[in-house]
Amino acid sequence: MWHDNETAIDYLNFGVVADACASMLKRADGAPISIGVSGGWGAGKSSLIKMVAARLHTLSEPDSSEKPDNTFVVLTFNPWLYQDFESARSALLQIVGDEIVRLAKENETIADKVDELWRRINLLRIAQLSGEAALTLTTGIPAGALGKTFNSIVNLVSSDARKTQAVEVDAEGIAAAATGLLRPSEPFSMPAHIQAFRDTLESLLDDLKVTLVIFVDDLDRCLPQTAISTLESIRLLLFIPRSAFVVAADNDFIKAAVKVHFDGAGISSDVATNYFDKLIQVPLHVPRLGLNEAKAYLALLLLEREAKAGTFTKEQFESALKLIPERLRNSWRGDTINQEFLYELVGTDETLRSLMDLAEGLASLLHRSSAVNANPRLMKRFLNTVYLREALSAPQGIKLDIAALAKWHLIERCDETLAEALAGQVHSDNDGRVEVLAEAESAAASQTRLPEPFKDNPFTRQWLDLPPALGTEDLRPLLHLSRDSGTRDFGDDNMTPDSRKLRDALKTATSGHKSLTELMNKIGPDQTELAMSKAWLSCSTSRNWKRNDEIVMLIECCKVFPEIGKKAASLLEQAPLKQVGPGIIPTLGAQPWAHEVLDRWKDLNELPKTTKNAIVNLKAKR
């Protein structure tokens, strides 16, 4: 299985973008800079910023050529982790303070500045925890909210590195606590206090000779208020020399969060966009995967699994990790990820070559499908589902190869309607084989028209061409393993031999006859109803809804057993209305069980006008 965590290993050809981003941060040379990494859910934002962070760590190595007065200190802040537990703004301030304390641990000359920074941070946190706190500290008016505020932060300012100590708060203790944070000669002014905090932090960063780079991730997983709180924290820290932010978020989410935050203000989309743009100097969009990147990604995921299983050597995998990104960087010259290149990676091993064929076939379809759109996270989840089903197959005595599992899951994921239509035709009396699927695969191979219910489009044709062919295979094992996506029942429905005989006779009957009636009377109404339903389902793909002989099986069974007319009506209801011709209406009109169905049909827009008229005329004659 493939985990859903970000990685610094480049499977997506993001290395070039990460290099450019790291270079931009380096060239800023201590000037404040903010970079926004934008992309949809699962596009690879977290992996991209992790690659950038890894490059900055390399620049800060002792043996790096980077000058000592421009060392990068990288922090990663995930506001999603603090949601519902603590304000994201307070958490970010504390993380910055903790890092400054760590960096200044052996530098006694700046100890006073560190204490001052913590005093400023704690006052900012108090001001946020209670809107009345700043007013109370300024006026001295007793307010119960302030006591609650100090209780809330009693554990936040008690370390040895923070000389400002929290105290037990009661009516007499408020003044003592306030005195520890706000000096008597220092009236509380929020603008002045914020500026003093920024000045102190700026001075410390300069003394420490570091550039603080804060990576903010998962912002688009947060509730709107948490996202806005984090952005406001960035505003507080931004544009201080030797500070930089790299913010990963979906732009559309940020716009929506801004609108929620200013609900009732009637702001436009442009205003919401500008809010984010004021914080971000350099917008960087995660590259969308093209067909070559999708092939490369799937190939590397499959080879990674084989390397862990020992069927592909570690050296071979590391070679693939090097060769594939090189190939992608030159794709603009025509160096594509093709079958020949993939075969060179794995050698002559047929099993590995079949996996490369699978990667190539899946990539094109997953890239084309709007349900997946070459999204890296969705492609990884797709493979996880396929291999999970493979793991479930062996204990149940099912033998299926990965390609067959992947082909079926692909149509489940990308065309659920077609998948359900095919699944509905799989049952024990046809040994799990779907005749219309075999016809469609043959039609796709010969470039002729596809039968119903297949949509005649490039995606469907390519799916039908994808090996292996499934039309001549028993699909019951595949569908049994896909029970997570639908209810499957392939039992024999307790059909008797005579019932099966009736079913087969009904499928070819063009009119009623004595032997058919005798067989129905022999097996009784329950088995007749079952045989009628099975015959009707088996003939669904060849029925054009124009001829009377196509509905003979319903009519003849209901003549013998009128009580199964309700079932016949429900089968008739499944008709594709656009195809129903007027020629069968008089015959149906003579059947009492069909009257309600016809009455409903005449009011539906999908029914052809000529067929509607036939129903209206028939009703007028009753």
Image (cartoon, helix red, strand yellow):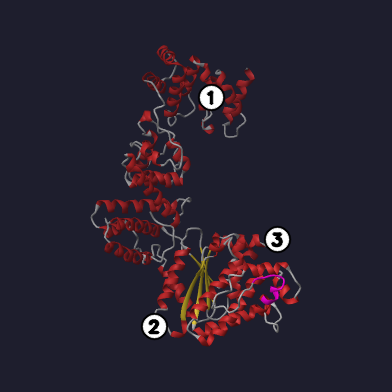
Residue 136 appears in view: yes
Q: Secondary structure at mark 1?
A: helix
Upstream in sequence: badge 2 or badge 1: 2
Report how far apart the C-alphas of labels 3 and 2 lie in the structure.
52 Å
Q: Secondary structure at mark 2?
A: loop
3 to 9, vertically: above or below:
above
Report how far apart the C-alphas of labels 2 and 1 lie in the structure.
82 Å
In this orientation, which residue lies closer to the viewer: 467 or 187? 187
Callout 1 crowding tier (Cα within 10 Å): few <14, some 14–19, many ≥20: some
> In the rendered view of the protein, which quadrant contains the C terminus?
top right
Q: Amino acid at mark 3?
A: Gly
Report how far apart the C-alphas of labels 3 and 1 lie in the structure.
54 Å
Residue beneath disc 3: 266
Q: Amino acid at mark 2?
A: Ser
Mark in front: 2 vs 1: 2
Image position, residue 113 (x, y; %): 57, 84
Image position, residue 38 (x, y; %): 52, 64
Chain part drawn in magenta? 168-176
Residue beneath disc 2: 65
> In the rendered view of the protein, which quadrant contains the N terminus?
bottom left
Please tell me the numbered disc located at residue 569: 1
